[in-house]
Image (cartoon, rainbow, N blue to C red):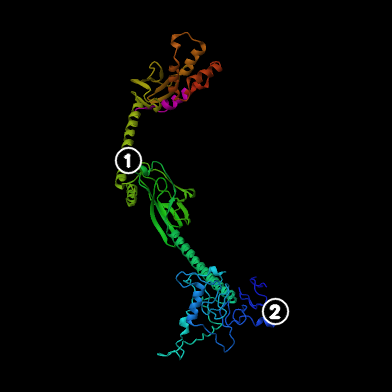
Amino acid sequence: MICPTCHAEISDDALFCSSCGTKIEPVDAAASAAVCPQCGAELAPGALFCSHCGASVAPAGVPAAVPMADDAAQAAAALWGDGQGATPTRRALVCPSCGAPVSPTDPYCPACGVRLLGSRAGSPQSAPSAQPAADTTMVDMAREAVAPADPRLRSGSTGPMPRVAVPAPSAASPHDDGEKPRRHVGKTVGIVVGVIAVAALAGGGLWYALDAQRQQDEATQQAEQATQALHSVTIAVAAEGWNTDEGASRLPVRVVGTNSTGEAVDETQYVTTAGTGLMLRQGSYQLSVAGSPIAADGTVYTVPDTVLDITVATDNPGDAVDVTSQGSFTLTPIDALEVTDDQILAAAQLAAADMADGHADADTLRAAAVQRREDAAAAQQEQQEQEQESYDSRHVVADSYEFYMPSYWDGRVTVQVDGDHVSVCSAKYPDLELFNVTVQRGTTQAVGDVGYACLGDVALGDGTYASVWARRWGWLIGYAYMTNSTDPNDYYTMDEAEEIVDLQTGGNVTYESIRDEMVANDGNSDLVFVTDDYLYACIVESLQPLE
């Protein structure tokens, strides 16, 4: 017969599975009488104890007899030997306690219920040695035979030792090896699994709560770090000649706004030529230039009224912020002659307030600014003197009149004055006269021809006039070129022609342009008369009678 639960092989008349303890429906009424009421195992006919669980199966009121100690010792020696290594003399298996025959598969003696050593070993050869295993309880029948509770065991009593009845173990008592009947295993396992599941759920809930708290704490810490972190902010700055790497002071920038904690900010920070130097927390700010830096050469700058609105919003404490795309500050140098003492002092004070590493020497820069202004003033004075000297050199004074020559001629002409007659010639080619001035009574009656003409008269008083005459060198040399003149006096080098025409026209017309136009127009050229216009404006109109 097979157990319907664990599929172990059991006897056909079993009421309970001898392996798992499952109740087996009885086949007939006679079979139920030979089953252990404790574990359901099949009982041998006449057995007083269950051979499977050791429970007492004796009829009510009939105690199970326990053999005397001597009998138990003899039975044990017969089964296991004498304890000195002797080999058993019999191969039949008997209970070591009561001597009743037992099966190799019986865990308990069917006669006395004692736990059998080596049970389930499978054969007599697998029985243990004289020393029982450490986890096996051996009933000492000699000790059990003397029960203190028996009134017959008084001090000094004599006579044969009586047999002592051992009460059968109750169904609720645990077995010697701590095992429970198999039918309770499933329930126990279920309880254990339930406890483990509850513990796992409780542990999981605790872990989830702790992890959530940890994540919240980390988020709070990260938010705090992000709020308190200072970020390097780069702005765009441009100023001619200003370079902090060469000793210039840093640009003072006013920062006004509110950081992410709600704290108001109004402070001045300093920025390098590269636009770095600002350190700001998360927040919104307005940036403006607080004052002028001072360049290494002493240059002071105008302060722009530009205002930049910026926002620092990064959550990463290590991030740098670049706001160069949001606008820039452009500073213009103040002319050295126009910078004031107050402007220099204000810039120097701002430079002195910068105490960060790498700051410039404010006193040195202030001295440089003052020196720059003084140098500019000295240069201006020198220039004015040179201009005056040059102006004086252009001033021509005759006996009854004076005039000023154009600066275009500086160093390129010579002047000869003889009374009221003045002749101005090319310094490079002295034979080439630009013009001359003569004085006569009345106006000029003959104005000359295309090659030589009077450009104008200026009244000097008392009926006298100063007349300005000039040769039109562009036409004269061009005409000789056109006619292939063989007269040596008509021969001029190209350089001579270019120089004299350049002086007479103030650089407005070249000899080649006059010549080419004459060739193209049969000797006619309007460019020839550019000389007249230039000399009239520069000489005739500047000529004044002496007081």
The image shows residue 272, relative to residue 77, as above or below, that is above
**As rendered, which of 82 and 250 lies closer to the eye?**
82
Question: Which amino acid type corresponds to the residue marked 1 in the rendered image?
Answer: Arg
Q: 10 Å neighbourhood of mark 1: few (<14), some, or many (≥20)?
A: many
Would residue 363 appear left or right of 329 to someone viewing this image? left
Q: Which x, y percent locates residue 329? A: 44, 47
Q: Residue furthest bottom?
A: 151
Secondary structure under the numbered disc 2 in the rendered image = loop
- Amino acid type indicated by mark 2: Val
At x 32%, y 34%, the residue is 382
Disc 2: which residue: 27
Secondary structure found at label 1: helix
Which quadrant would the N terminus be assigned to in this image?
bottom right
Q: Which residues are magenta?
A: 531-547
Report the front residue among 528 and 53: 53
Q: Position of residue 8 (x, y in %)?
A: 64, 71
Q: Nearer the viewer, mark 1 or mark 2?
A: 2
In the image, farthest residue toward the top: 486
Mark closer to the chain start, 1 or 2: 2
Q: Is residue 258 visible from the viewing direction of this image?
A: no
Q: Which residue is mark 1?
A: 372
**Quarter holding the C terminus?**
top left
Could you say which quadrant of the image residue 258 lies in?
Answer: bottom left
Residue 546 painted magenta: yes
Q: Which mark is residue 45?
A: none
Question: Picture coordinates of residue 397 (x, y %)?
Answer: 34, 25
